[in-house]
Image (cartoon, rainbow, N blue to C red):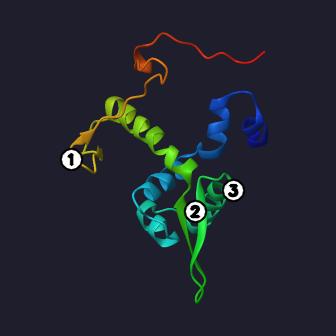
């Protein structure tokens, strides 16, 4: 797969996937949205090999969805925090979670979003910003340029 071609092509979906299109990257962003920021926190949570985690953190940082910050000089240690682009990905993860709950929801209790204000569960839904209509109920198709 030619990531450079995907990330610069005319399809917005492929451009987005070029940054966060693999499972490990999305799960790292999920954990970052839960407040994790240190390498060992991600590694423990995900059970991911250190070399794979290093590559994904580097790629997410280069993509601008995570920011690398030094939190200790001795020994040198960095943390990874969501940028605005990373925070803007949280609703995308919420929509993926709702889709997963609907179509692959069997088994043990599942995680869910909850309101910080009320503690009540939140059910994500993607809507058209112009009309407010749910996209799942809107007949549509993808239009490619040119």
How far apart, in angstroms, are the residues tagged by discs 2 and 1? 35 Å
Task: From the viewer's side, name the closer residue of 104 and 135.
Answer: 135
Dot 1, crowdedness within 10 Å: few (<14), some or many (≥20)? few
In this rendering, the label closer to the viewer, 1 or 3:
1
Residue 78 appears at what percent x and percent y? 58, 74
Can you identify the residue that label 1 sits on? 118
What residue is shown at x 49% (from left), y 20% (from top)? 130
Q: Residue furthest top?
A: 139
Please report whichever mark, 1 or 3, sits nearer to the chain's N-terminal start: 3
What residue is shown at x 45% (from left), y 52% (from top)? 30
Residue 144 appears at what percent x and percent y? 70, 18
Dot 3, crowdedness within 10 Å: few (<14), some or many (≥20)? few
**Answer yes or no: do the residues labelled 3 and 2 have beta carbons within 8 Å?**
no
Which image quarter holds the C terminus? top right
How far apart, in angstroms, are the residues tagged by discs 1 and 3? 36 Å
How far apart, in angstroms, are the residues tagged by discs 3 and 2? 14 Å
């Amino acid at each position: 797969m030619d990531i450079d071609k995907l990330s610069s092509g005319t399809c917005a979906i492929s451009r987005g996937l070029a940054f966060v299109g693999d499972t490990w990257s999305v799960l790292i962003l999920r954990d970052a949205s839960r407040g994790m920021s240190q390498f060992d926190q991600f590694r423990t949570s995900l059970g991911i090999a250190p070399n794979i985690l290093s590559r994904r953190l580097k790629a997410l940082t280069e993509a601008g969805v995570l920011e690398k910050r030094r939190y200790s000089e001795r020994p040198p240690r960095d943390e990874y925090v969501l940028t605005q682009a990373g925070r803007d990905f949280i609703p995308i993860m919420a929509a993926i979670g709702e889709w997963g709950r609907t179509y692959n929801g069997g088994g043990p209790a599942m995680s869910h979003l909850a309101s910080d204000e009320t503690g009540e569960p939140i059910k994500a839904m993607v809507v058209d910003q112009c009309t407010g209509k749910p996209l799942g109920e809107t007949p549509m198709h993808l239009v490619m340029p040119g």
